[in-house]
Image (tube, grey):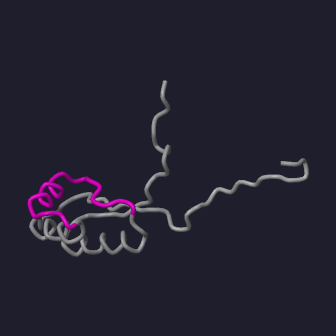
Amino acid sequence: MSDEESTEYFTLLCDDPSHEVVLVDCGPREMDVVLAVRKVTGQSLWHSRVLARRAPVALLGGLSADRAQSAVAVLRRAGATAEWRQEPEPGEGTAPSP
């Protein structure tokens, strides 16, 4: 490479960061929430029940904002308390090593 040539490096940023869906509380209508968890996750009925009883728990990750909002809407209609949030970037939120 000559002195006149230079190399440029670019960091690509995603316009729509990934989001996760968190089931905060199952609420009083547990069976309705279990069925909603099954609908949004595609898990078995047994596994959906385990997830619903383990709240607060992250149900889904790596979603677009629209898909995360849709999943939260399904859960809320079933009586659950749910939210969607932006997933932390790799390396964020981790404690520094000693």
Q: Is residue 12 left or right of residue 27?
A: right
Q: Looking at the image, which residue is at 30% across and 69% down?
A: 72
Vertical placement of 74 versus 44: above or below?
below
42 and 30: which is toward the camera = 42
In this view, the residue farthest toward the front is: 1
Position of residue 64 measured from the top left corner of the image (x, y, whole percent): 42, 69
Position of residue 57 measured from the top left corner of the image (x, y, whole percent): 26, 53
Position of residue 30 measured from the top left corner of the image (x, y, whole percent): 11, 64
In this view, the residue farthest toward the right is: 4
- Number of marks present in the image shown: 0
In this view, the residue farthest toward the top is: 98
62 and 10: which is toward the camera = 10
* Corner quadrant of residue 71: bottom left
Position of residue 75 measured from the top left corner of the image (x, y, whole percent): 24, 70
* Corner quadrant of residue 27: bottom left
Residue 57 lies within the magenta run: yes
Q: Looking at the image, which residue is at 18% across and 73% down?
A: 78
Q: Looking at the image, which residue is at 23% across and 66% down?
A: 41
Vertical placement of 95 versus 93: above or below?
above
Q: Which residues are magenta?
A: 42-62
Q: Is residue 45 left or right of residue 59?
A: left
